[in-house]
């Protein structure tokens, strides 16, 4: 089973622009009954750092966009009788590089490179007995990564018609 998703990303512009963001959530800050797991058994955190920078290489002709996102997640994945038995860990890094060339006012060429890597781990049996989880259920590691390179050509036929051709390798 498979499928395709068409996403539109920034194309840059004639001004240098960017952003940087950091998001954090932790069991250290979420206390007082915010979950069904007793506070002394709670173990979760999310740290996410992301950024984007874009700008011109040649004004009104050639632009770039660079972006990244790093996610570090720990969360309970199994609870039995109000006790957290397992943790799920996710460490992910995604980045994108994009070049857009406005060949003529009606023609545009875009090259985009996307890379993502995730380490997913479901382990860490905490205070359980063998009647609750078997060894096989107690953990597993899954590493996944993806790379996508795409080349897109657009031609503005009229105000209402755009001809678009794409080639991708993943």
Image (tube, rainbow, N blue to C red):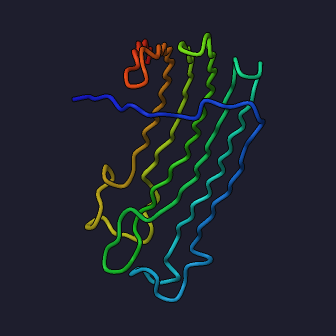
Q: Residue furthest left?
A: 1
Q: Nearer the viewer, residue 98 or 128?
A: 98
Which residue is at a point 63% across and 64% down the rendered structure image?
Answer: 24
Q: Residue at x 48, y 16 (%)?
A: 152
Instruction: Name the residue at 68% across, 57% down.
Output: 22
Looking at the image, residue 76 sits to the left or right of residue 48; the answer is: left
Q: In the picture, which quadrant includes the C terminus?
A: top left
Tell whether 61 sits left or right of 45: right
Viewer-proximal residue, 37 or 168?
168
The quadrant where residue 77 appears: bottom left
Quadrant that contains the N terminus? top left
Name the residue: 51% across, 18% down. Answer: 149
Q: Position of residue 154 (x, y in %)?
A: 47, 16
| Image quadrant in which you'd find residue 52 | top right
Is 94 situated above or below 128?
Answer: above
Q: Nearer the viewer, residue 40 or 24?
A: 24
Can you give x and y, in whole percent of width and height, for residue 90 in the image? 51, 49
The percent position of residue 148, horizontal first and vertical second, equals 48, 22
Could you tell whether 11 is left or right of 127 in the image? right
Q: Can you give x and y, in whole percent of width and height, for residue 166 in the image?
A: 42, 14
Q: Nearer the viewer, residue 111 or 162?
A: 162
For this view, does 33 lie left or right of residue 91? left
Residue furthest bottom as drawn: 32
Q: Is residue 112 above or below residue 91?
A: above
Circle count: 0
Which quadrant of the figure has residue 59? top right
Whether 131 is drawn above or below 150: the answer is below
């Amino acid at each position: 089973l498979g499928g395709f998703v068409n996403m539109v990303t920034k194309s840059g512009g004639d001004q240098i622009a960017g952003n940087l963001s950091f998001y954090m959530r932790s069991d250290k800050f979420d206390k007082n009954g915010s979950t069904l797991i007793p506070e002394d058994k709670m173990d979760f955190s999310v740290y996410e750092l992301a950024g984007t920078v874009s700008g011109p290489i040649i004004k009104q002709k050639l632009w770039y966009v660079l972006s990244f996102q790093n996610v570090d997640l720990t969360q309970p994945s199994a609870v039995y009788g109000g006790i957290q038995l397992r943790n799920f860990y996710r460490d992910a890094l995604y980045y994108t590089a994009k070049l857009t060339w406005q060949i003529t006012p009606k023609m545009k060429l875009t090259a985009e490179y996307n890379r993502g890597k995730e380490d997913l781990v479901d382990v860490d049996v905490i205070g359980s007995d063998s009647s609750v989880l078997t060894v096989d259920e107690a953990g597993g590691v899954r590493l996944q990564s993806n790379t996508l390179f795409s080349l897109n050509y657009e031609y503005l036929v009229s105000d209402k018609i755009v001809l678009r051709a794409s080639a991708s390798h993943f």
